[in-house]
Amino acid sequence: MPSAKTQPARGMRDFLPADVRKREYVIDLVKEVYESYGFEPLETPAVENIETLMGKYGEEGNQLIFKILKRGVHESTGEADLALRYDLTVPLARVVAEYRDKLPKFFKRYQIQPVWRADRPARGRFREFYQCDVDVLGSRSTIVEAEIVSAASEVLSRLGFKDFCVRLNHRKVLTGILGIAGVSLDKHESALIALDKLDKIGSEGVKKEFEARGVAGTAGDQLLSFFSALSELEHAAEIVTEDNAQQAFNKAVLGRIVEFVKDNELGAQGVDDLQSILDFADVMGIGHRVKIDPTLARGLSYYTGAIMEINVKDLAGSLGGGGRYDNLVGMFLGQDIPACGFSLGLERILVVMNERNMFPAELGSSPADVMVAIWNKDSVVESIKLARELRAGGLSVDLYPEADKLGKQFKYASSIEVPFVAVIGEEEQAQGLVAIKNMASGEQQTVRRGEAVDLINGFLTQRRNGAT
């Protein structure tokens, strides 16, 4: 059993080479998709001033911020002046406020960096994890929401996910529903926090949560009655198999919302926005992925408009979420700048892809295409030269670091799953040749050194195509 001294801190992880390769595969694809939509990269520090983060994430979020105590002569005060980055959105808002004059009118950025939360570690939940964010600042157009949903959907589709949907709601719709139900304005945030747990703890659980948070009984009953009626619509939609079933369901849900909120101005604005997003999503070819879900609340307090979450069928939790936050930058700048963003949960994606064997076989666990063996002490220089030649030809090459029995070198190559081994013995060196051993088949072929790169590349192509 490993010693506690060698284990990482709870909620933190070490990543071995095979793990890193998988992470880089996903991250590279995310970057490729986001850049194809015109988003630019951004990085921010791991540490922020504590006042930058506090008060931006609601009551529950504030409790999960990793605070950093003052240092040096101030250490004994027990006070914190810095904090580890909780997410990538608040730092983005700070950056926009700081560099507003240097940024374009419509700032489209993606950011892939770790964040830290003082949460209780659990399966798929860590204290240090990466977020993959994409945001647009400067526009109130609902084209932004649709494009962000399209980009996130394309990432998941290209990774191999097929059974996912984008749940979509609007904070103004929620505000309208809460107002009509009779929830007092000062209790809206509490009601939304409780409502956000509906799919996890059910109606009875939410009812108890309402009571604990001081939401009036009749108001809570009206809310749960409204959402129960919607669940009947969803059940009906599940047994419909037509291609436009999702669009028909969304239309029916919006109709119920309009009927409930009636003349509530904010609610009506939210419904209009949702309809516009659906229309643009249809044009972008992802309308079948989007599902109106009035139960979606998302706990972060800075959302002001549309809110989104991606869920996979039969999988608890989400693979990402986001929404519009038009007032957040104003907390730093003194003037509001419209903004909308989405964050993919890299860790969750990796867990699911591992469980479902979704990674390409060619990722493998090999550190190199070929390993160059060392025949004896007299051939060290020639082996080093060969490794250089093969690398110059575009191959990744591992050089065995010492003269050893050839059998041991082959055994080592096999243990690290290098597919080919190149050997220059005394005879090969004298004739300008190199022996290439295929570790899968055991076959060995001798060619001129200038032909080695083409031979190995040919073998690698066959290997990728399933042959040995």
Image: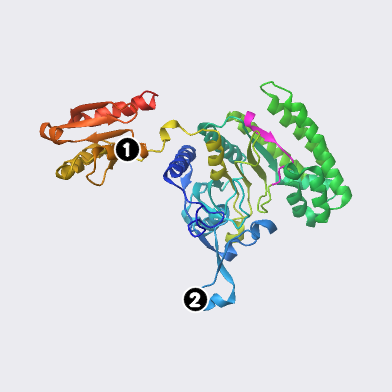
Quarter of the figure with the C terminus: top left
Residue 387: x and y in percent read 23, 40
Position of 18 compared to 233: left or right? left
Location of residue 285 by image quarter: top right
Question: Of label 2 and label 1, which has the lower sequence position?
Answer: 2
Q: Which mark is residue 248?
A: none
Q: Is residue 147 above or below residue 3?
A: above
Amino acid bearing label 1: Lys
- Circle 2 packing at 10 Å, graded few (<14), some (14-19), many (20+), is few
Q: Is residue 447 above or below residue 373?
A: above
Q: Name the residue beneath numbered marker 2.
A: 72
Location of residue 117 by image quarter: bottom right
Magenta-tinted stretch: 287-297
Amino acid bearing label 2: Gly
Secondary structure category for the residue under label 2: helix
Q: Examine the rendering and report whether any part of residue 262 can be seen.
A: no
Q: Nearer the viewer, mark 2 or mark 1?
A: 1
Q: Is residue 379 above or below residue 80?
A: above
Q: Name the residue beneath numbered marker 1.
A: 411
Location of residue 262 by image quarter: top right
Which residue is drawn at the image coordinates 34% and 36% (left, top)? Answer: 414
Give the alpha-carbon distance from disc 2 to disc 1, as whole Å: 53 Å
Position of 6 compared to 172: left or right? left
Q: Is residue 43 above or below residue 223?
A: below
Q: Which residue lies most toward the right here?
A: 218
